[in-house]
Image (spheres, grey):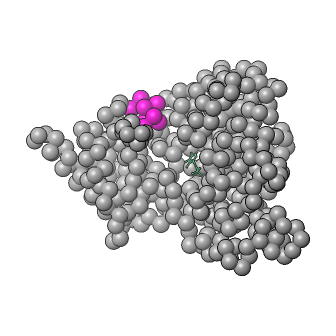
Amino acid sequence: MKLPIYLDHNATTPCDPRVMEVMLPYFTDLYGNAASRSHSFGWQAEEAVDYAREQVARLIGAEPKEIIFTSGATEGDNLAIKGAFEMYAGKGNHIITCVTEHKAVLDTCRHIEKLGGTVTYLPVNKEGLIDLQQLEAAITPRTILIAIMYANNETGTIQPVKEIGKLAKKHGVLFFTDATQAVGKIPVDVIKDEIDLLTCSAHKMYGPKGVGALYVRRKNPRVKLTAQLDGGGHEKGMRSGTLNVPGIAGLGKAADICRQQLEADGQRLSQLRDKLENALLKLDATYVNGSRDHRLPHVANISFNFVNGDGLMMGLNKEVALSSGAACTSASMEPSYVLKALGVEDDLAHSSLRFSIGRFTTEEQIDFVIEKVTNTVELLRKNLIIS
Ligand SMILES: *Cc1c(COP(=O)(O)O)cnc(C)c1O
């Protein structure tokens, strides 16, 4: 077996070979600028972009016109939040979000506060879920946007998106969801879920890095955003800049494959994930973080008590590539703010591992990982007792 085994698909996914194949001609023969209207090079590029727009729209139940191509989810998060804040300044300046959001949302909200906006950061329960009554109580006449992620990148916990959409509509507030981890993995439908703005990213769904999409609803209501990049007026004036044609073609293909394989992939991955999780839970003092009922099919975040977090990582990372519950911020190792928000103690957060499996993960690899992690945890615990 080839080592190390990659179990960090929430950080990024490998590009599917079928996606790469679709992209390649746009680097070589079909290198036109999609905005060139006067020759076939431009037309061919535009055709590829239009096709990808349809593919992405179809995956999330949107209209092609509602898809704005971006450089990824970080840009989409910034454009949705800052763009709505500027556009709807006449209505209010209050945004509601949640403490376990991705930094691309949280840091953007901090920026909004510096600009004079007010932000409510909803807490989560120990499963990682927001409370809908708390959400409704937080809405004021000045609230313009609810920004709650679809599924969490560290735990895989899926928020009650449909209910949030319903509440937002009832109060005439826009609902934005960072669905980067959900799109392509579980069914996402902007109509059924009553979503007004949604962001996703190609490299989290077996497409290339540096390209993503922002869904902007065009009716009931028609959502407008103030552009954050000014220039040639591309993407309906919401996002200027020459389009990344190969990347966009790849995103489209990635979306198409995800749509076709979503159910089968989800079933296979949840079986593998459950096998991994159930085997590791046989160890003493081992806990799952986040909701087990409302969770992405391919994610397991597990804490191993009485194990040194650094030791665990060092014991594993030659053979298994995964993320820990500690994040490197500057020089120090901080326990994950997401796990802390669920009430996980610092020590336990440090000795947590995020397993995120993917389309090309095999059962043989999972069996190897079960044995490797089990042995490493047992060894570290033995050493702890001896020393
Ligand atoms: C990865 C990720 C992002 C950032 O996406 P990029 O395309 O890398 O900018 C934002 N939000 C969530 C939930 C993510 O998982």
* Residue farthest along the bottom direction in this orientation: 29
Above-or-below relation of 247 to 285: below
Residue at position x 52%, y 35% in the image: 100
Q: On the image, which quarter does residue 387 sit in?
A: top left
- Image coordinates for residue 23, horizontal then vertical, percent: 65, 71
Does residue 336 belong to the magenta stretch? yes
- Image coordinates for residue 47, horizontal then vertical, percent: 80, 69
State the quadrant of the N terminus: bottom left
- Image coordinates for residue 59, horizontal then vertical, percent: 69, 57
Residue at position x 47%, y 39% in the image: 291
Q: Which residues are magenta?
A: 335-344
Looking at the image, can residue 219 be seen? yes
Above-or-below relation of 41 to 208: below
Residue 139 vs residue 120, the one in the foreground: 120
Q: Is residue 29 left or right of residue 102?
A: right
Residue 2 vs residue 294, the one in the foreground: 2
- Image coordinates for residue 211, horizontal then vertical, percent: 64, 57
